[in-house]
Amino acid sequence: MNTTMFSRWLPAIAQTSLIRRTALGVAGLAFVGGTVAGPAVAAQAAPEHVGSPVSQSVLADKDDKGDKGKGKSDKRAKDRKPSRDKLVPHGVQGKQSRIPLSGEQSDNVRAIVKATKKAGLDERAAVIAVGTSLQESKLENLGHLGARNDHDSQGLFQQRPSSGWGSVEQITDPEYSTTAFLTGLKQIDGWQNLPLTVAAQKVQVSAYPDAYAQWEDQAADLVADAWTNS
C-alpha cells in the first residue's frame, strides 16, 4: 500500500472512530440516565393501589357485595312494621271501637304519619295523633259544618282558629294541623309515658276526655301499616 492511499484512508478511519465514540457516548448517557431517572419515572407510572388485578377485582367484588348486603338490610329494616310495644306501650284502655276507612281517610292517616316523621317524632306520637283524629273527625278533613259545627272547629283535629290554632286554610291542611297538634303534645312533660286518652286530652281539652281511649287499638294498626309506606 503506498503512502498516498494510506493518507486518503486516515480521514475515513478517524470519522468512523468518531462515530463509534459518539454512539458509545450516547449509549452511556442513556444508561446513566436510566439508572438515575428510571426509578422516578417508574414511581410516577406506578398504579396508586398496589396489588395484582385478581386481588383488586376480588376486593372490589367484596365491597360491591357488602354494599348490596347493606342495601338489603336497610330495606328489610324499612319494610319491618313497628313493634306493638312501641305503638301501644301501656296497652289499650276500655272497650275499643273500629270504623272502616275510605281512600280519603287512609290518605289522611298517611299524611299524619308523614308529618309525624317530619317533626322528628316516633311511632307512639303517630298513634296518639291518629287516635285523636279518629275521635275528633273520624279521620275526615272537615270544613265548617254549619249548625252542626262545634263553634269554629275544623280539620282533622277539629282545631279552632279563634283559639289560636291557625287560619281556616292552615287547620284544614293535614300537614299543618298534624304539626300543630304535635307541637302541643311535645309541650306536655312525659307525654311518651301517658295513656293515649290522657295525652290527647291535655292537647285538645275536650268535653269528653275519656273518649279518645276507644281508638287506640285501631290507631296502632293504622300506624303500623302506614309507618313504612309514608
Image (spheres, rainbow, N blue to C red):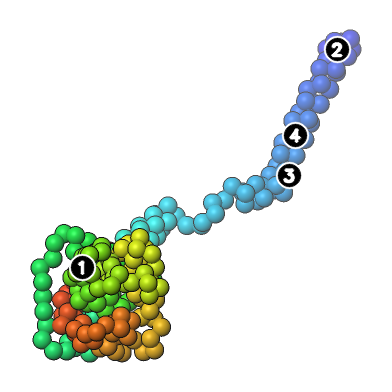
Name the quarter where the N terminus is drawn. top right
- Compared with 139, 21 (above or below) is above
Label 2 vs label 4: CA separation?
28 Å
Give x and y (percent) for residue 133: 24, 73
Asked if residue 81 can be seen in this view, the reply is: no
Which numbered disc, 2 or 1, marks the residue that appears first in the sequence? 2
Asked if residue 209 can be seen in this view, the reply is: yes
User: Relative to residue 54, is residue 104 drawn left or right?
Assistant: left
Which of the two residues, 40 or 61, is positioned nearer the viewer here? 61
Label 2 vs label 1: CA separation?
134 Å
Label 4 vs label 3: CA separation?
10 Å
Type of amino acid at the residue the image marks with label 1: Ala
Q: Secondary structure at mark 3?
A: helix
Residue 195 circle label: none
Which of the two residues, 144 or 103, is positioned nearer the viewer here? 144
Residue 147 circle label: 1
Considering every residue shown, the one lying at the far front of the view is 147
User: On the image, numbered disc 2 is attached to which residue?
Assistant: 8
Give x and y (percent) for residue 186: 39, 81
Residue 32 circle label: 3
User: On the image, numbered disc 4 is attached to which residue?
Assistant: 26
